Amino acid sequence: MPYVDQMVAKILILNGPNLNLLGLREPEIYGRETLDDIRAMLEGEARALKLAIDFRQTNSEGELVDWIQGARQGVAGLILNAGAYTHTSIAVLDALKALKLPIIEVHLSNVYRRESFRHVSYVSQAATGVIAGLGSNGYLLALQALARLIDRT
Ligand code: CA2
């Protein structure tokens, strides 16, 4: 059988505003892990799943839109915790709609047990699936789900 050099699939993991504060404040809602802890956990899982990850955070809506647009090339799947932009940003939704790849929306907290303004998600309209309320495990489950969704074997 000829040797076929299959490139490692890349998963883009984007985090929106204030998620840089994880572990530093409000541990009763968001847990004690920092965003760096979550990144390290996902890097370990990605190795096991033979995936590459690109993990980023921004407080800027425009930068988030630019990064989502950039995923049109060279990215096999997207994990997105858009933070508060989840509930407000039509710009993020429009950028997501231009993607032809699986998108998993993740929230650390169970947004449906919280204020009613968090029950609305623009991101969900473009998402393949949604995970909320499982803390950092939600990111791990999203990565595992994407590994299966993009399985090219
Ligand atoms: O539960 C989630 O993951 C959220 O996306 C987090 C957002 C919130 O606006 C969404 O409704 C649900 C907020 C992230 C802010 O994170 C902080 C962490 C520590 C201290 C302050 C904010």
Image (cartoon, grey):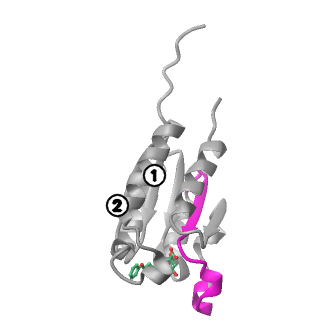
Q: Residues within 10 Å of mark 2 (few under 14, many from 20)?
A: few
Which one is in front, 11 or 98?
11
> Which quadrant holds the C terminus?
top right
Amino acid type, label 2 = Asp
Image height check: is 96 above or below 40?
Answer: below
Q: Which residue is found at the position 36% from the left and 67% from the top?
A: 34
Q: Which residues are magenta?
A: 99-118
Q: Which mark is residue 42?
A: 1
Image height check: is 69 above or below 62?
Answer: above
| In this picture, residue 150 sits left or right of residue 71 | right
- In percent of width and height, residue 111 lies at 60, 81
Magenta stretch containing residue 101, yes or no? yes
Which one is in front, 50 or 151?
50
Amino acid type, label 1 = Leu
Helix, strand or loop status at disc 2 = helix
Image height check: is 36 above or below 146?
Answer: below
Whether residue 74 is visible to the viewer of this picture, yes or no, is no
User: Is the CB of the residue bearing disc 2 within 8 angstroms of ligand 1?
Assistant: no
Q: Which mark is residue 74?
A: none
Image height check: is 118 above or below 101?
Answer: below
- In percent of width and height, residue 59 lies at 34, 74
Whether residue 125 is visible to the viewer of this picture, yes or no, is yes
Which one is in front, 79 or 38?
38
- Find disc 2 in the rendering and name its residue: 36
Q: Is the Cβ of the residue at disc 2 closer than 8 Å to that at disc 1?
A: no
Helix, strand or loop status at disc 1 = helix
Q: Which residue is found at the position 59% from the left and 88% from the top?
A: 114
- In percent of width and height, residue 66 lies at 39, 62
